[in-house]
C-alpha cells in the first residue's frame, strides 16, 4: 500500500528561466503515467480533463450566450477560490486575490499544454533524456 504524509511539503528552488520552468513541469507531469497509485493517476487525469474543459470553454466562448459563459466562469472561480483559500490557510500562506484572478485566465492553458507535452516531449534532466 501507499503511505501518504499529510504534514509533508516539498519546497524546490525556482527555475532560472521560463524554459527551465516548463521543462521541469513537463517532467513532473510525465511522472503520473508511472505512478502506482490509482488515486494519484485518477487525480492527474481529472485535473487535466477539468482544465482542458476550461480551455474548450474559452475557445468556444463566442458560441455560448454571455449568461452561460459567465455562469460557468463564475462557478469555476468560486470553486477554485474555496479550494485555494483552504490550502493557503492550512499552509499558513498569504493569498493574493489579484494573482488568483489573473491565473484563472492562464492556468487552464498551462495545465492543458504541459499535460499534452508530457506525453510526447522528452526533456533533459541531470544529463539524460526522460
Image: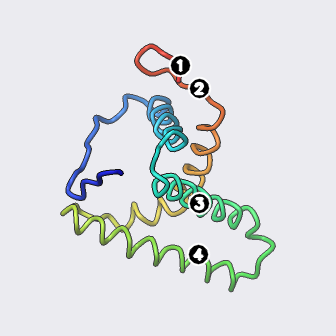
Nearer to us of marks 2 and 4 is 2
Name the residue tied to disc 1.
129
Question: Upstream in the sequence, badge 3 or badge 1?
Answer: 3
Determine whether the residue tagged by mark 4 lies in a helix, strand or loop: helix
Nearer to us of marks 3 and 1 is 1
Q: CA distance from mark 2 to mark 1?
A: 6 Å
Seen as rendered, the residue at the extreme top is 127
Residue 122: which numbered mark, if any?
Answer: 2
Question: Upstream in the sequence, badge 2 or badge 3?
Answer: 3
Question: Upstream in the sequence, badge 2 or badge 4?
Answer: 4
Question: Upstream in the sequence, badge 3 or badge 4?
Answer: 3
Structural crowding at the residue carrying mark 4, measured as other residues with C-alpha within 10 Å and reported as few (<14), some (14–19) or many (≥20): some
- Compare residues 29 and 79 and report the one nearer the observer: 29
Q: Quadrant of residue 53?
A: bottom right
Q: CA distance from mark 3 to mark 4?
A: 12 Å
The residue shown at (73%, 61%) is 59
Name the residue tied to disc 3.
51
Q: Position of residue 11 (x, y in %)?
A: 25, 42
Q: Position of residue 42 (x, y in %)?
A: 53, 58
Residue 82 is left or right of residue 39, and the answer is left
Amino acid at each position: 500500500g501507499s503511505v501518504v504524509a499529510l504534514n509533508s511539503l516539498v519546497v524546490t528552488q525556482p527555475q532560472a528561466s521560463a524554459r527551465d520552468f516548463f521543462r521541469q513541469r513537463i517532467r513532473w507531469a510525465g511522472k503520473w503515467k508511472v505512478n502506482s497509485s490509482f488515486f494519484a493517476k485518477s487525480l492527474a487525469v481529472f485535473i487535466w480533463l477539468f482544465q482542458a474543459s476550461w480551455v474548450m470553454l474559452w475557445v468556444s466562448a463566442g458560441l455560448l450566450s454571455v449568461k452561460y459563459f459567465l455562469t460557468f466562469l463564475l462557478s469555476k472561480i468560486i470553486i477554485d477560490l474555496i479550494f485555494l483559500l483552504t490550502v493557503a490557510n492550512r499552509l499558513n500562506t498569504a493569498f493574493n486575490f489579484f494573482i488568483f484572478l489573473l491565473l484563472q485566465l492562464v492556468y487552464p492553458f498551462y495545465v492543458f499544454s504541459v499535460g499534452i507535452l508530457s506525453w510526447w516531449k522528452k526533456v533533459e534532466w541531470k544529463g539524460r533524456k526522460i
